[in-house]
Image: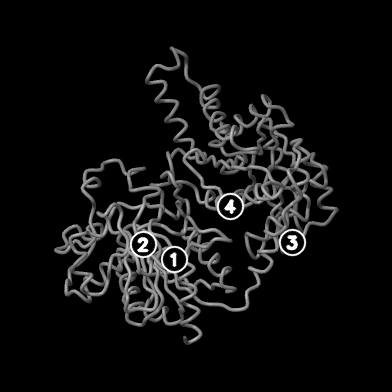
Amino acid sequence: MSKFIIITGGVVSSLGKGISGASIGKLLQLHGFKVNMIKCDPYINVDPGTMSPYQHGEVFVTVDGAEADLDLGHYERFLDVNMTKANTNTAGSIYQTVIDKERRGEYLGATVQVIPHITNEIKKRFCAFEKDFDVSIIEIGGTVGDIESLPFLEAARQLCLERGPQNVISVHVTLVPYISVAQELKTKPTQHSVNKLREVGIAPSMLICRTEKPLSEGLKNKISLFCSVAPKAVIECADAKSIYDVPLNFYKQKVDEQVIALLGLKPKHAVDENWFRFFDKALHPSQSVKIAVAGKYSELQDAYKSVNEALRHAGMNNDTKVEILYVNTEKDNVNEKLKAADGILIPGGFGTRGIEGKIETVRFARENKVPFLGICVGMQCAVIETARHLCGLADANSTEFNPATKDPVVDLTPQQKNVVYKGGTMRLGNYTADLEKGSLAHRLYGKDRIEERHRHRYEFNPAYVKTLREAGLKVSAWHEGVLPEIVEREDHPYFIAGQFHPEFGSRPQRPHPFFDGLVKAALKRKNGK
């Protein structure tokens, strides 16, 4: 029988439930278990695809085209398991499924209610991977006490009742705040949070306590007593320099041994500690570079979570600390700020705000021979910049930013022009591209055909490919010979841009070629080579 770990959180959001769950999953993987993770978000949106980054941070895209919470990125990077639509669930998608069944008459005249119909649908999704994995880790978003999360918590309670406590355990992530005036850590928020969880019928087996200061044995014993968990199951989770330090922290506190014992599992083998050794070396590099990330969400790092991690992965592969210099293309003097950069990256984005600053950023990178990587809208800006400044098409633009432009070098495909519903209708998920042999893209990937994840509506207009090629911007990859996927310049040390999102496929021990190439080129520039 498959085992389940329910991850919940209390007191405040953003405590790191996703990283905590992924860290536990990694430890179980290192024992030889097959682990998968499921995210449940209690909001009514069907998915976060229509939400602003200010509301939700980055939207992660799965290989099969689901728009999902950024925690799925943590799951993939820690477990190296590609997430799918079955790994992400929202209250909106669950209610939509149940209502569709009701409209089709599938409930045979029954009154459709939260219990059992909504909770049954949630439990069905909890069990999506039980035939293929030893352990499913289920993260319930939000905080205990939120009205929105109650159906998910009720479904978790029912699952524990049906499967038994030896097959389902609860791990609760909570806050132990430090009150600087009193110079004390306070356990009361954790006590109240656990009480709220117990009110809905779930007794946690383990507490992960987020804290700024170390927890004394006295505090751990106090939390244990008031929250009715074993002292050894009160896990200190202090702020870490890197998220990749968290699994080692848990390992030192024997989190894996406790989880294995609680679930009655038998390890396949001793822990493979090579993963820890890799990060021990990778997180202490001997050199550094500065990479400018130029976008409009510079004050919100969660908007570029996967980009930031992909840069760090490339740094790890090159014994290099990547210092990220955020440039606000809407507010900053980009030409001034970019002078400090060894490399430049324009991430994906939507809307007109900050676009002219991004186009100016491309021009700076091109004219000053600064290594450049463009992602999605970053590629589109590279196309617009070349058209305007090297092809004499002064009005060149994307129809997203100027529907009346005389030269729509970036435009909607015919399939996108009549779309009414915005949610889930972009070009999403994995698509193939064929690489031109001898190109920079081909050298970076080392193969003829690639698959990459997409999330966009607008494309480089093929009608302008020849014109821009004459100005030095060539297409080096095509999807089915029709849609340009990668552009690059041969008169530049490193200038490449893709219509897709390479950051989603990057891994700590397997950085994406685009990011690896950018860091290598930035090092060469910094070292004067």
In the picture of the structure, the residue carrying the numbered disc 3 is 213
Residue appearing at x 44%, y 35% in the figure: 93
**Tag 2's secondary structure?**
strand
**Tag 4's secondary structure?**
loop
Label 2 close to label 1 by CB (< 8 Å): yes
Q: Position of residue 341 (x, y in %)?
A: 45, 78
In the picture of the structure, the residue carrying the numbered disc 1 is 514
Rendered-image quadrant of the N terminus: top right
Which of the two discs, 2 and 1, labels the residue nearer the N terminus? 2
Which marked residue is nearer to the observer: mark 3 or mark 1?
1
Callout 4 environment at 10 Å: few (<14), some (14 to 19), or many (20+)? few
In the picture of the structure, the residue carrying the numbered disc 4 is 14
**Tag 1's secondary structure?**
helix
The three-letter code of the residue at mark 2 reads Gly
In the picture of the structure, the residue carrying the numbered disc 2 is 498
Which of the two discs, 3 and 2, labels the residue nearer the N terminus? 3
Residue 326, numbered circle:
none
Q: Position of residue 464 (x, y in %)?
A: 19, 64
Relative vertical location of residue 493 with respect to residue 348 in this rendering, above or below: below
Q: Quadrant of residue 10?
A: top right
The answer for how far apart the CA atoms under marks 3 and 2 are is 43 Å
Residue appearing at x 45%, y 30% in the figure: 95
